[in-house]
Amino acid sequence: MKQHRPHLLVVFALAIVVLSGLSVGIQNMLTDQRFGWTPRAASGEIVLVAIDPKSIERIGVWPWPRSIHARLIETLEKAGATDIAFDVDFSTPSDPAADAAFAAALQAAGGSVVLPSFRQPIHAGKSGLLHINRPLPEFAAQSWSAVVNVTVEADGRVRRSPFAEIIGGQTLPSMASVLAGASNLSRPPFMIDYGIRAVTVPTVSYADVLDGTPEVLRQLKGKRAVIGGTALELGDRFSVPNGAVIAGPVLQVLAAESIAQQRALTSTSGVVTWSGVALIALLMMLVWRRFPAGPRVALLIALGVAIEAIGYLLQSRWPIVLETALFQTAIVAYLTAIALDEIDVRGLLSSIAEKRFERVTMSLGDGLVCAGPDFAITMWNPGAESIFGYRADEMIGRPFDTLCAHPASDNTFAPFSIRDLPEQSLQAAGGRVVEFEGRRKNGETFAIEACFSGWQGTDGFNYGASLRDISLRKQEAEKIRYLAEHDSLTGLPNRDALQVRLRAAMAEAQCHPHPISLLAISVDNLQQTNVMLGQGFGDLMLRTIGEHLKLELGIGAFVARLTGHEFAVLADHADGEAAMALCRQCRAAFDRPLPVGGRSHKVDVSIGVVMLPDHAASIDEAFGNAHLALVRAKAERNGAVFYEASFRRDMESRLSTEADLVRALADHEFELFYQPQVSLADHRVIGAEALIRWRHPERGLIPPFQFMPIVHTSPISNAVARWVLHTACRQGAAWSGAGHRIRMGVNLSPSQFAEGDLADDVVTALAATGLPAAQLELEVTEDILLDDAARALAMFHRLLDQGVRVVFDDFGTGYASLSYLRKFPLNGLKIDRSFVSELVSSRTDAAIVGSTIDLARQLGLSVVAEGVEDRTTADMLAKLGCAEAQGYFFGKPMPASEFAATFFAVERSDQSQARAVRA
Ligand code: C2E
Ligand code: CA
Ligand code: CA
């Protein structure tokens, strides 16, 4: 249907043109145009004797007496006119004398004068009835009759003239035939050649002829004369082609001239017309599909021009009018068909809507791309250009899949093609959103979010896609995920990431049982490093440690950072032995100092290990138990400790005790007992050591070894220590105030060196209680000094400046006791009970105690022997040169009141008696 459309349109156009009669009008127009292009002159053989305004003015009002016409005939005859033809009505009688004169003139002319007959419609009667006007019989008998009828065509113009007409059964020649001397009268009416210009017809005035003006008469010699009215008032005028109006006689002359000059025109037949149209249609069928619109338009125009040229040539050379109206109609129809094809009316209408649509899409930031049923791109907006880098002219017509990268199977995106989209899903509201990997012009691939829609077009299913570059969004999401899963300082996975890993491993182990090891690794003394070398160095050290761990342990171990100074290592499919190997590897990694920030730094680590699933059922428990093992490793100064069930129990009881201790401090459940220190020379009490007791409401009196280790590592440590110091000082001051100026020994806690300011506390305590500084004796143990020797040393000096005594407790039990004597400015030492108790039985111990006493004497230090339980030992110590002692033999630790009652009361009454009691 579509391919026949232009031809059908032509048939339709031809039918309309023919049926409406438009073809006649077109043909007339074309023929008339050709007249304009081929002007011809009249032959000059026929002269018009015009009844012109001048004649009417001279002769009088029309109609004239026929005697005047009689005179004219005579004059014309005399002038030598060969033929005389009247285009004047002689059908009605007038003045009989004049009529008779006219008849006589006709007769005198030898019967050669031509008079007109014509049909006239009877206006009053029924249409179609015609009255035939003939010359009066008396005239007709003496003349030739000729018809002067002309047919006025539909457009009001006169074009044709007959050769002859049958009137009343008699064939009468037309005046033109008569004037031109035509022989064959049976021909159909002919077309007057209006190329013959009316102005070239020789014309003389009737009045001039009648006057016998010789000049005028000369013009008539040997010519044919046509007499007729040209004056306007006579009304005998006709419209002819090319807008002219001419008088009836002129028309008769032109018709006669047409015959005489062989210019009586006839039209080509319908056969020619329709064969021509068929040829044009055939030609068009041949070229329609083969050539684009331009050449076809050129061909049609050339054809039209050529046809008209041929028509012009034919008409100018031969009396043939080539009917080209339908040819031109067909050509114009074909041109219209091409125009319709090209312009596409519907397209025109929708182009306005499209303009608006385009405005919007062109300003969109998103890429907007349309594709036709063949998946070739049909629309490309600037948004798409900025995303992909292609210009519209590069992309229109190219397959949509040019925009899709075809990612490898390990990519996050599956391969995508527009061809895979089911049409139905695209027609639903909202279209279909797809994420896929796109490719830019420069080859770069990136994430796209596309919303596809589709619609049924005239040419098939069309696709529309709004495309958005989401690579930034993806990168951001990736970054956020990285930050959420990694430690910002070391770049190692963080605790959350480790948990995810551990959860996955544990879940897997539930299906396929296998051991998992989790190591918690703590960097010792990080706080100290931060204080000494700065936070920046500490950070750098942690980063280096992280890298080092990863490097040393290899890919089998998942290294993460837990908190400030703690790392963790997760090893899947690692049993106890493998875990042990890992621990060794970890410790070996830090055997040598690490290069940190341009210096070598020795790092010590402690490791707590849990084995899963044996040591824990949940992730929290796994982390908790690893930590318990780590705490134990730190406390025991033992590099790596594997978790044991007892750790948790200990920790739990420890935690409950800790809570109990806090309450105990608040409820004043702590008490100080005092143990006497005596002079071995006379067993006189010279001092007391304050020893803490916990009077528990349910458990009774609890000795310090059961709770002091917990206090030392708990937050209340310093508070308890301060309480001891103050209470002991107050007691010492009270006794001193009562006249018993004995020494007060106070045991120091590690926390008093680690945190707080011991020297300050001592000043405060002395000031608050009024105990003379010289009476206060602070007992320090090796583990206290071990923690932070530098700080301890500084503190010692300040304490000594106060006038307070400092003695070294439990001398001989530590492994560096002697070196401390050298390092610290001490006032004295207390020989540990373990040496004293075996003094009598063990020669070795005796030797040690003896040399210690000697050493102290030489160093100028005081000596107290602890744990003296019997007289033999006391005596032996005295013999060895020991001046002072402490022990059950002299008195157990006891409440202050008991101490005072026992020793001060006795002292007052009878010292020797008291000694006797004890002995
Ligand atoms: P220490 O400082 O060596 O105290 C001496 C310990 O030896 C005391 O035990 C005392 O009762 C015991 N003792 C004295 N003479 C004898 C004897 O002849 N035979 C035997 N078997 N033992 C004797 P206590 O009171 O149980 O204190 C134990 C440890 O607790 C103290 O050892 C000390 O290290 C710590 N301690 C006690 N009170 C305090 C305190 O107030 N502060 C601090 N920081 N530690 C304290
Ligand atoms: Ca002590
Ligand atoms: Ca001691």
Image (cartoon, grey):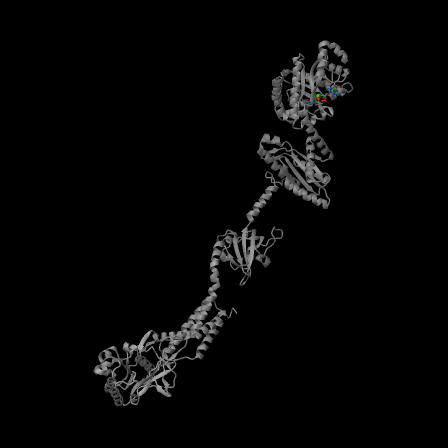
- Whole-percent x, y for residue 843 in the image: 77, 19
Q: Please tell me whether residue 174 is drawn above or below residue 531 in the rendered image.
A: below
- Whole-percent x, y for residue 827 in the image: 65, 18
Residue 124 or 400: which is nearer the viewer?
A: 124
Residue 85 or 427: which is nearer the viewer?
A: 85
- Whole-percent x, y for residue 438 in the image: 56, 53
Query: Is any part of residue 80 visible from this angle?
Result: no
For the image, the number of numbered tags is 0
Q: Please tell me whether residue 828 is drawn above or below residue 71 in the rendered image.
A: above
Looking at the image, which residue is at 78% across and 19% down? Answer: 841
Q: Please identify the quadrant where the C terminus is shown.
A: top right
User: Image check: 770 left or right of 32?
Assistant: right
Query: Is any part of residue 403 visible from this angle?
Result: yes
User: Image check: 287 left or right of 790?
Assistant: left
Q: In the figure, residue 75 lies in which quadrant?
A: bottom left
Q: Which residue lies furthest to the front in this view?
A: 124
Looking at the image, which residue is at 66% across and 11% down? Answer: 739
User: Image check: 424 left or right of 5?
Assistant: right
Residue 35 or 860: which is nearer the viewer?
A: 35
Q: Please tell me whether residue 846 is drawn above or below residue 608 in the rendered image.
A: above
User: Image check: 792 left or right of 302?
Assistant: right
Q: In the figure, residue 781 lies in which quadrant?
A: top right
Q: In the figure, residue 568 lies in which quadrant?
A: top right
- Whole-percent x, y for residue 694 in the image: 71, 23
Residue 422 or 88: which is nearer the viewer?
A: 88
